[in-house]
Image (cartoon, rainbow, N blue to C red):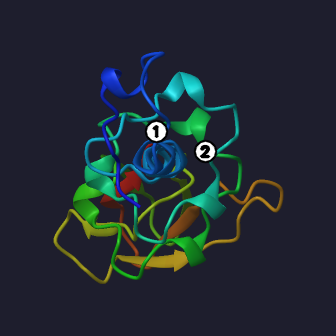
Amino acid sequence: MAWTNIPNSDLDPESPITTSLVTALRDNPPAIAAGDAGAPKIQLAAMDTDSVGAAQIKADAVGASEIAANAVGASEIAADAVGVSEIAATAVHRSELYTGVVSLSGGLSSLTTTDVVFGYAYVFFPMLHALDGDSNRSSLMADDTDGVNPDSPRISIQNTSGSVGSYDIDFRYVRA
């Protein structure tokens, strides 16, 4: 059905009721709902709260180009609404992550071990450098978490030599 303009002259008190007038009166409301060319557009104020949901939106009808910048924030996304299954395999690239970089350094007495706690929940694998030039002095080992807080990643650094050594650790982490 297509939208039909009805001239005022067809609606004055002296005009006859014609088949074309009745047909237009019948067909125009569905043409408005369908958004046909020439039909008035339904305004947001005319829609009831929660009148449009996921069932009324065609698959792939809304993409990034239909969403205004910063229109969707944390308050618009329900807790646990987005999981691994909702994110495509290569959808998030490093350039889209809000990350930070930290460098830590310290010294180790001979034949000792120290624990390094990163202080961030999501840490990329760190780079460990033995600053004194002897790569045999330090080794990187995985360490247990504190058993209470899984968001407290840590490593142990061990000086396996008989002399004092130093280290430098660089790592990237995901920021909130």
Residue 9 pos. (x, y %): 32, 22
Residue 53 pos. (x, y %): 64, 52
Q: Please give the residue where the numbered disc 2 appears in the rendered image.
A: 77
Q: Is residue 152 visible?
A: no
Q: Please give the residue where the numbered disc 1 appears in the rendered image.
A: 72
Classify mark 2: helix, strand or loop: loop
Q: Residue at x 42, y 25 (%)?
A: 15
Residue 61 pos. (x, y %): 40, 63
Front residue of 68/145: it is 68
Classify mark 1: helix, strand or loop: loop
Q: Amino acid at mark 2?
A: Ile
Query: Height in image: 87 above or below 121?
Result: below
Q: Residue at x 16, y 71 (%)?
A: 133
Kindly check if marks 2 and 1 are in contact, taking CB atoms under 8 A apart as contact.
yes
On-image quarter of the N terminus: bottom left
Front residue of 42/156: it is 42
Find residue 85 and name its label: none
